Image (cartoon, grey):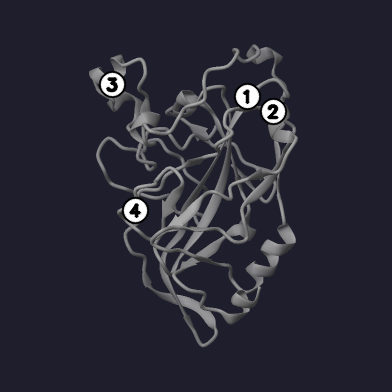
Amino acid sequence: MIFDGQEKILSSPALGMAGYNPFASGAFHPGPPPGLLTPPHIGIPGLNPYGIPAAGLLGPKLAAAQDRSPVDMFFPTSIPRPLRGPPEPPEQDVHDDPKVDLEARPLWEQFQEFQTEMVITKSGRRMFPPYKVKVSGLDKRAKYILLLDIVSVDDCRYKFHNSRWMVAGKADPEMPKRMYIHPDSPSTGEQWMSKIVSFHKLKLTNNISDKHGFVSTILNSMHKYQPRFHLVRANDILKLPYSQFRTYVFKETEFIAVTAYQNEKITQL
């Protein structure tokens, strides 16, 4: 996991290898370092923190189904999957050292100065500032999948009082958090590095009956959240639950979800 440009590899016993994987079984999910982020907890037996059945809990029918995977249990089956392309280059021929930079960082810092607020609505509202990154250091031939999720920062509920934010009590129960897969995934490293990667299609909602979970995430108003960017080297979305994740956190993108802007300075920005 990478914070402010510093990479921290977290051990994942569930995978038996070095790396961070949000899809690993909840019993082994290392999560972020204590005190920075609070991963969502659903408390549903057999599901990890991201709502995907642990690999050993799929059951014989699912395990036998060639066209089903843990990903199917999470993303609607109506989402078209990219067709399998040519096989990836052999592991020993892949050379990468990924670097991720936040686009429009000065704008994010302007908002952060007054505590960034993101409006959530029943129908879903896109983020502003929009979440965009520039990726470099990828292997040009290898394929990568890029994802974004949004997790709770703490277990507090907030209120805006006397022109400042303050803790107002304990956080409300969180809805299961979905991981948003960038629609261009998987693509080659060369393709990702040739453009700005934008997650502008992701919407924020407070509608617990949301029917468009593959393009939105459900948040609680007056709670603080942190977006996380994930980079996975894999040529098939079906491989996500078993792949190593590189996770990048930009503290400038932390925000409080609101149904209407509270701070007039944020409204002006």
Q: Earlier in the sequence, mark 2 or mark 4?
A: 4
Q: CA distance from mark 2 to mark 3?
A: 32 Å
Q: Is residue 112 left or right of residue 17?
A: right
Residue 50's tag is none
The residue under label 4 is which amino acid type? Met
Residue 28 percent coordinates (x, y): 40, 35
Q: Which residue is mark 4?
A: 175
Image-quadrant location for residue 89: top right
The residue under label 1 is which amino acid type? Lys
Q: Which residue is mark 3?
A: 62
* Secondary structure beneath label 1: strand
Q: Residues within 10 Å of mark 2 (few under 14, many from 20)?
A: many
Residue drawn at (35%, 48%) of the image = 176
Q: Residues within 10 Å of mark 4 (few under 14, many from 20)?
A: some
* Secondary structure beneath label 2: helix
Q: Which residue is mark 2?
A: 189
The residue under label 2 is which amino acid type? Gly
